[in-house]
Image: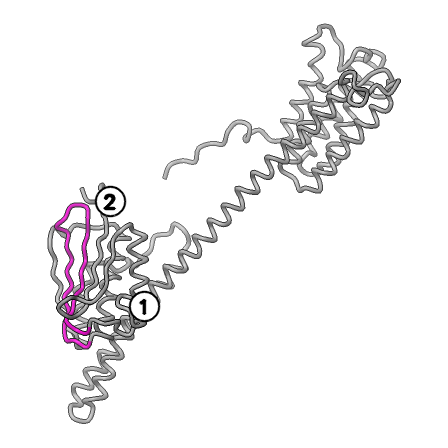
Amino acid sequence: MPATPPPPLFRRIPPEAWVALAWCVAAAYPAVMLGGTARLHRGAAAHGGLAFTLADTAVAFLGAALVRRLPVLSITLLLIATWTETDGWAAATQVPPAALLAVDVALFLITATRPRRSSRTAFALAAVFLVLHIGLVRGNTVGIFTGTHIGSADGAALLALVAWLAGRSVRQNREHAEALSSRAAAEAVTAERLRIAREMHDTVAHSIGIVALQAGAAHRVIDRRPERAKQALGEIEAAGRETLAALRRMLVALRQADGEASDTAPPGLADLDRLAVTTTAAGVRVTVRREGRQAPLPPEIDLSAFRIIQESVTNVVRHAEVGDCLVTVDRSREGELAVEITDRGRGRGRGRGGAPGAGFGLAGLRERVALLHGEFEAGPRPGGGFRVAARLPIPEQVAA
């Protein structure tokens, strides 16, 4: 089994590390871009220099560590560290957008990964902080409202809004993908249940048809030929045991863990002779004719071909009122498996709702063939009787 590829780098780094890294970039930006030992703004020297910056960094790192567990407290600590580091109380200074880089990164991660209530509360805290800070600036110089220019705090507010909207978009995309995945899983479960229902129908319907036929025969001859009635009862017992064993195998397979190999192989064309013997013992002789090279088939094609033949033979037993039928398995054409079941009995609806080729059994067979991209035909024969035929394509790598 191939190893699972590692996730991208940005997924391997935890959110706490991203927020801490954003704080370090914001703290180093003035010194790297403007030169000197300035902190996040020009008048920071009055607050203790490097020691004051280290204290703010400790608070910011604590906020980064809480970004997943306590998102609201994380945003609060990051805002406090940013406000003190940029002299937010200084009436003549606006918070520069770069100083809020850690807050924006935390806001994005919280909005993208945490519940909506936490993301909204975190954004509200950041918005209130910036609005109050803008109100402290002398002259109320808010560029957005004065129409002159966009101030630093205005730009920081816009970046916070962009970070929140980006996180919201990421969360919506993830929720949409999860919804699609859940829907696909539900559809897969439904398809599997339908498949199991078809398997149980095919297994039980065939055996019940044999049981009904043998019971009718035993009822007719029990007084005149008790040994024949005894033989029919034996066939009924064998058919019942076989059906119970098949159902037991199916239930065992359903209870197996995913990926665990099954100790019971599903039926296939190799079981045709056993099917013919069982049906012949019930009073309808089945002749199996094989044409072409009988090579191994993919499991889904092998099983579907067997079920098509089994259901068709069951319909012959139950509805055709005839003593024999012919089963042809043809692999003479490259890349194709053709099966045909013909009889000389009644060519009408055979109790399937009146219309030729209608009914639950044949509808299930038609669905099986369609899932394998094959062709299916069922209907009365021109010279009398009934014909069921299916063509199933074989993948090239298997056919070769």
Q: Main secondary structure of the magenta part?
A: strand
Based on the picture, tell me whether residue 230 belongs to the magenta stretch.
no
Q: Secondary structure at mark 2?
A: loop
**Amino acid type of the residue that numbered disc 2 sits on in the rendered structure:** Pro
- Residue 359 is marked as 1
Residue assigned mark 2:
395
Q: Secondary structure at mark 1?
A: loop
Of marks 2 and 1, which one's residue comes earlier in the chain? 1
Residue toward you, 299 or 5: 299
- Badge 1 crowding class, 10 Å Cα cut-off, few under 14, some 14 to 19, many 20 or more, is some
User: Going by the picture, which residue comes out furthest to the bottom?
Assistant: 223
Instruction: Determine whether 58 is above or below 214 in the image.
Output: above
Residue at point 71% right, 27% down? Answer: 160
Residue 173 lies, in percent from the top left, at: 56, 38
Is 394 on the left or on the right of 57, as rendered?
left
Residue 398 lies, in percent from the top left, at: 22, 44
Where are the magenta residues, as a range? 321-346
Residue at point 42% right, 54% down? Answer: 257
| Nearest-to-viewer mark from 2 and 1 | 1
Q: Quadrant of the N terminus?
A: top left
**Amino acid type of the residue that numbered disc 1 sits on in the rendered structure:** Gly
